[in-house]
Every structure is written in structure tokens, then in C-alpha cells.
Amino acid sequence: MKVVLLRVGIDTGSGGIHGPIFDDSTFEFVPIPDYSGIDSRKYGNTKDKSHGRMLADYFPLARRNDMANQSIHFDPEFDSFTYGDPTSPKARLRALMKGDLLVFYSGLEGWNSPRAPALYIIGYLEVATAGRARELGEETVRGQYSLNFHVRHPNVLKKDWNDLVLVRGSQKGSRLLETAIRISTTSHDRDGKPLKILSPEMREVFGDFGGKLSIQRSPPRWVNERFIHSAAEFVRSLN
């Protein structure tokens, strides 16, 4: 089997904030903006999953009104458990097979608390199907991936069709976690700037990705075969 880690959700480079994490380690998944404006779901009309706030409330007060009118790019979505992406760094995800694990992590920061920004596992898909849209076929794509951002908007699907990679998780084996699991620590890059890397504790679980420890803004990180068992066991133990 295969296990791959993938960063998702709003961050300082796309949206300008980290998602919120609370004192009890519960969190909210805040997706990135949809700059095309095609989606009717906006930060100001969409509630979070568990804490009773509009997603716009997690932005600084000075930006809140503007972001309330900003469309959202919901991907991954945790209702039917799908993920889609047409870009080349994600193309290899088409090779995922039934039973593989696509593990999502996000940048989170303490909400009304001093918890510093860090990277946390927030959910995962136990793969049911995966492939390029054009290989899966229109019937499968529209039937099994209808809630995915790239499929629910016909113009987006038409534009992305040839390159769009879609992954669907099983309902029973996929989940958005209740509490986030920290996986990063802080190091520094060659210029001395802070850099988030996989923590020593998590290297015991996932390995070191061939020495590529940076997970700050990285392409998918594929777990080495030697760590597949420990990684899968760890991920499936999360709730």
C-alpha cells in the first residue's frame, strides 16, 4: 500500500491566515479562497463544523468584511470525502489505489490563545478510487465526485478535464479528525529564516522522506516503504 502526506487549507500564502486551533486541540478546517468567485459558498455565509462561527470570523477584524464576500475553494471536502487537483505536482496521486491513505495536514494557530503556528494532521482519505477525470470517465466523475469543487462547477470541470486528478475516500475509512495532531517543529533554511519540518517524533512514524524534511509548502510527501506499516497504523488510530 501507499501513504502520502499533503498540505491543504488556508495559509499565509493563500488566504493570509492559519486555521484556528483551540485549547482542547479541536480545530476548524478553513479552505483556501476561490479567487474565480464561482462558488456561492463564502466565508461570510458558511459556518464552521463545530464551534458555531462563520468562517469569516477567523480572519482579523480589519479583513473580516472583505473576506465575508470572498468565495471558498472547498477542496478537500469531508462530506463525500473527495479531493481534486489539476496541477502537475499532484499528478502522481492518480496512482493511489484502494486502501491507500491520503493524509491531509494544515497550518493551524491558537485561537485567542498563544499557541504558535504549526502544522497538524487534520484528516485523511482511505482511498476508494483515484485517477485522472478523463480516465475515470464522465459517468464516474459526475456520479462519485459531484461534491468536489472541480466537478460541481461545469466550467471548471471542462477547463480541468484533461489534467484533473481526483481521489475519493471510503465513507467508512475516511475522516475529518476531531482533534488535530501536530507533526512539525521549527528549523531554519539556508538564509536563516524559520522553516517548518517534520518533527523527530513524527519521523519515527513517517520516516524522513529521503531527507526532504521540509513540509512547509511542499509537494506531496510519499512515505517510504519501510515506514508504511507504522504510518498507516498511526493514521488509522487518530480520531
Image (spheres, grey):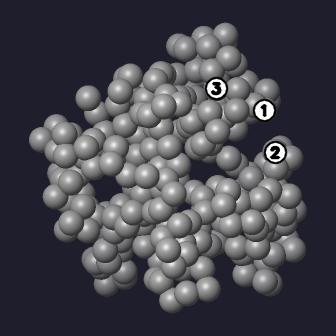
Mark sitting on residue 153: 1
Residue behind mark 3: 145
Residue 174 position (above or below residue 95): below
Q: Name the residue rendered at 64%, 39% in the picture.
A: 79
Q: Secondary structure at mark 3?
A: loop
Instruction: Specify the amino acid type for callout 2.
Output: Asp
Q: Residue 38: which quarter of the image?
A: top right
Residue 214 position (above or below residue 169): below
Distance Cα–Cα, label 2 vs label 1: 8 Å
At label 1, counting other C-alpha atoms closer than 10 Å, the crowd grade (few under 14, some 14-19, many 20 or more) is some
Distance Cα–Cα, label 3 vs label 1: 11 Å
Residue behind mark 2: 39
Instruction: From the viewer's perspective, tell me whether residue 106 is left or right of residue 139.
Output: left
First of labels 2, 1 by sequence position = 2
Q: Percent position (x, y) of residue 25? A: 48, 70
Q: Secondary structure at mark 2?
A: loop
Residue 94 position (above or below residue 84): above
Residue 165 visible from this viewpoint: no
Mark 3, mark 1: which one is toward the viewer? 3
Instruction: Specify the amino acid type for callout 1.
Output: His
Residue 170 visible from this viewpoint: yes
Q: Secondary structure at mark 1?
A: loop
Q: Name the residue rendered at 21%, 66% in the picture.
A: 201
Q: Are marks 2 and 1 in contact (CB under 8 Å)?
A: yes
